[in-house]
Image: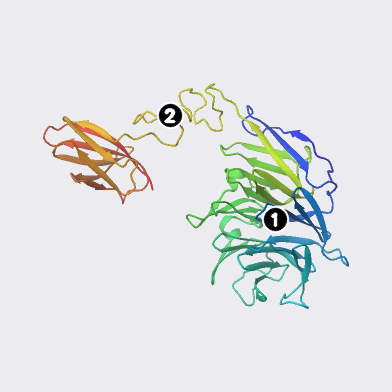
Amino acid sequence: MKKGFVTLMACLAVAPLFTQTLNLHEDFPGITWPFLWDMEQDASGNLYVCSEQGILYEKKNQVWKTYDLNPNGFEDALGIAVDQNDVVWIGAKDGLYTLDSGMVSRFTTTNSGLPTDYIQTVRAYNDELWLVMFGNGLVRKIDDNYTHYTMANSELPDDYVGDLEIQADGTVFAAANGKVTIISGSTWQNYDFDAMFGSETWVYDIFIDHNQDVWFGTRTGVIKFNNTTKQFENLKSTYGQKKFSAILYTPTNQLWLCELFEGLHYFDQIGNQYFFDGDVSGAPSQVFDFLYYNDTLRVVGNIGATVTGLTITYPDDDSDGFAADVDCDDDNPNINPGATEIPNNGIDEDCDGQDLMSGTFQLAQTTVELFPNPVRDFLSVKTSRPVDLGFVLYSANGRFLQRFEQAPQLDMRTFPDGLYLLEMLDVKTGQKQVAKILVSR
């Protein structure tokens, strides 16, 4: 097991012109064994880490403090959650613990409604706790009431739940081997990942990002639940069919993955991939939990509590002052986020994702204004003088879609988002003008 950490230069997997440095720093001196299983932060940024030998580590104001949860035992402390009152809950092999104002309390089958003492995951939502019981289903705790869900008394497809996470609206995602259960209120929905995405798509880790999309690190790659479409997406071909024991997607659109026993994979916001070999470079080879806070990535696993920082230097090939991570065309100095947009030329000069659409046109000595553009529902038409106009809408590749009679507004509600061509015809003179219309909702 590796016990020291240095600044590392890793070999680049993709885009060899880019350079990257992974900096690993031991966050708690001397903790390289026993394993650290889980970590959490409270609303003030205080850090809590639980260990293989029943120890809870608390970091406040850069100072670490140690709590021996059960001085009479050495059972693993496996999962942590911080509730809305900043009470820290710890699931362990010998019960459920709390840390409240510096005091440790323990709940077991003898003094509470716990069905068993072996708890491997704890998650908090408002005034309730969800507990993953090792081999014995789930428990939902509200105040002193414990509700036990198993295959025998609920729609849970497997009692051996591996991980559980909760969305901001309280929707629960629980994974048991290749089965995923979504619990929303009293509704349970089960999905068989093996049947949907191929054999051995067993879930190791679940992460819910800032968009409330749900990411699954599995034995054979990455699966994502798109919270907007409410559909699962197979991303195995995108990120590789590997064993991913931990997964995290940052608010800045970066993906971190730990390939079990191998090292860390990192995908930046513009599609470049990097790999830091756990055996060669000293990067983690077993990560049990990621945590992202204030632009800092923390990792726990077989390397102790560490702070991981990544610096990437991108080129500026066209020397316009904007590097390739923000410049949408790094070969053209006239195209960059600081450039002035030229309307209606089909070029996105300022890298905002679209060409500026002008709304004013000249047709048969008449000024025609179209607004708003981009349009959501109705496109308004205003002319400088009375004129008989006709309108024909085409797709971006010229396919006829609809003919409109002149009206103060054109109804665009039935057309999906995208770019369209609107032909304007002066009925009297036969003159035409074509406008680009962007439908965007």
Q: Position of residue 413 (x, y in %)?
A: 31, 51
- Position of residue 50 relative to residue 382, above or below, is below
Task: Give residue 123's position: percent from left, percent from top.
Answer: 66, 63
Counting the numbered discs, the total is 2
Q: Is residue 125 left or right of residue 47?
A: left
Closer to the camera in the image, 74 or 390:
74
Residue 112, given in percent of the width and then of the height, sits at: 73, 77
Residue 252, disc: none
Query: Which of the pair 380/178 is nearer the observer?
Result: 380
Circles 2 and 1: CB atoms closer than 8 Å: no
Q: Is residue 79 left or right of residue 399?
A: right
Question: What's the residue type where badge 1 is placed?
Answer: Glu
Question: How far apart are the two marked residues, 2 and 1, measured between alpha carbons?
Answer: 43 Å
* Mark 2 surroundings within 10 Å by alpha-carbon count, few (fewer than 14), some (14 through 19), many (20 or more): many
- Residue 39 position by quadrant: bottom right
**Residue at position x 56%, y 59% in the image:** 168
Q: Which mark is residue 40?
A: 1
Q: Which residue is mark 2?
A: 349
Left or right, 238 with reference to 419: right
In this orientation, does residue 43 appear?
A: yes
Q: What amino acid does circle 2 point to?
A: Glu
Its colouring scheme is: rainbow
Q: Earlier in the sequence, mark 2 or mark 1?
A: 1
Name the element at disc 2.
Answer: loop
**How far across and how far down the image is residue 385, in percent?**
15, 36
Determine the secondary structure under disc 1: strand
**Direction from residue 292 to residue 358 in the image, left or right:** left
Mark 1, other Cα within 10 Å: few <14 / some 14–19 / many ≥20? some
Q: Residue at x 65, y 33 (%)?
A: 312
